Amino acid sequence: MVTKMVKAELMEDKVIVEEQKDASRIYNKGFFGIYDGKLELNLVEACYLLDKGKFEVEKNGKKLDLKKFMEHSLSYIPDFEIKYFVYRDLRERGYVIKEGNDFVLYERGKKPPAKPSFTVKAISERAKFKIKEMAEFIEKAKNKLIVGVADEEGDLTYYIAKFFKLKGGLKERKYEGKIILLNDRCIVWDENLMEKLKEDFIGRDFGKYIQISLTETCYLAEKGAKIIKNGRKIGMKRFIQHAKKIQPDIENRFKVYSELRKLKLLPKTGFKFGSHFRVYSSEPEKSHAPYLIHVVGSDYEATWAEISRAVRLAHSVKKEMIFCMVDDEIKYIRLKRITP
C-alpha cells in the first residue's frame, strides 16, 4: 500500500497544510506551527519538515524541492540559514522549539501549553559581538536567554547569557599612610599601611615593600591614603590624569573595582587569564577566585571567536566569565557555555 504524501502550500512567508487529518497529525507529533483545523507553519518549521520528508510543498501548483524552498525563504529572512541550523539542531536533540520574536524553547519533556523556559537567539560566528546589544537581548527575553552561535561548518555552540549578581564576604575599611607613585605602578613603604594591605590581600608583598596597581591606588586614596610623587602629595584628579596616559580605561576599571569592594569582593589582576580582574569572594589564602571580570564600555565590540576563547579559558580554570559593561550604570553579564 502506497502512503499518500502530505501536501502543503507555500503562501509567501508561511506554509499551510489544509487537510485537517494531516494537519492534526503533524501538530500533535511535534507541536509544529499553529493548528486551528488547518496547520500554519513559519518558513523555518516548514523547511525542517520538508528536510525530514514529512510533506511536499507546492507553490502555484509547482512542487518545490529543499533547495528552491531555502532560496525562497532567504528572500524573506536574510539570516534564514543561521536560524534554520539552530532550529534543526535543537529539534534533533529532542526539544520542542517554536518561533516567537526569536525562538522559544521548552525544557526537555515539556510542550505547549506549558510556559517555555528559554528564549533562543540564533547568531552567526561572523556577526559582531556587541556588549550593549547583548544586554538588550537579555532585557527583552521573557525567560532565560540562550545564544546559539553557528560556525562556518554549521556546528553550534550554545551560551546562557544573563545579568549576574555577585556578592562576597570581605569587609572594607579606611586606610592611612603614604603611597609612592613611580610610573605605571606604586610602592608602599609605610609599615602601618603595609600591615593593613597584607591583612586585606591588596597588592603584592615583596618583603620590604608592597607593590600596588594604579587601580588599587585609586581605591586606597579614596579610602584615605595619600599619593606622593617626587616628595609631594598629589590629588586624585592629578593622579587620574597621570594614570590615563598609561592605562586609558583607568576610570572604568576603578568604578568597577570600587563597586566590587562594596559587594565585599576582592579584585586582583586577571592578566594571566586574559581579563582585567580575577575576583575572590573570600580570603585568597582559603579559596580560589570564582570569577573573571573584563571591564568594557557600552560601545565594546569583539568577534565571537574572541568571546568563545575567553569563555572556554574561564571554564578551563573553573571560573565564571563575566563582562562588566560600564554605562549609566554597571551591568555584569555572564556568558556560560552549555550543552543542551
Image (spheres, rainbow, N blue to C red):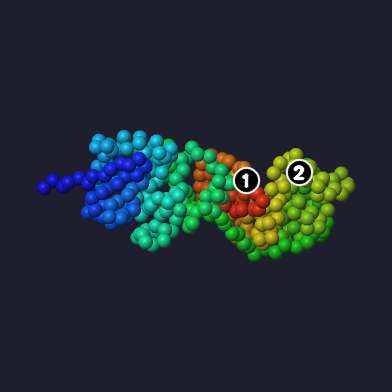
Of 121 and 37, the residue lying toward us? 37
Question: What amino acid is at disc 1?
Answer: Ser
Of 92 and 336, the residue lying toward us? 92
Marks 1 and 2, how far apart at CA: 21 Å
Residue at the (64%, 53%) spot, across then down: 330
Crowding at dot 2, Cα within 10 Å, few <14 / some 14-19 / many 20+, comes out as: many
Q: Quadrant of residue 7?
A: top left
Q: Quadrant of residue 8?
A: top left
Residue at the (41%, 61%) spot, across then down: 115
Residue 261 shown left or right of residue 149 in the figure: right
Question: What amino acid is at disc 2?
Answer: Ala
Residue at the (32%, 37%) spot, across then down: 69
The tag earlier along the polypeptide, 1 or 2, is 2
Which residue is tagged 2? 243
Can you see residue 17? yes
Residue 205 % position (x, y): 73, 53
Crowding at dot 1, Cα within 10 Å, few <14 / some 14-19 / many 20+, comes out as: some
Which residue is tagged 1? 298
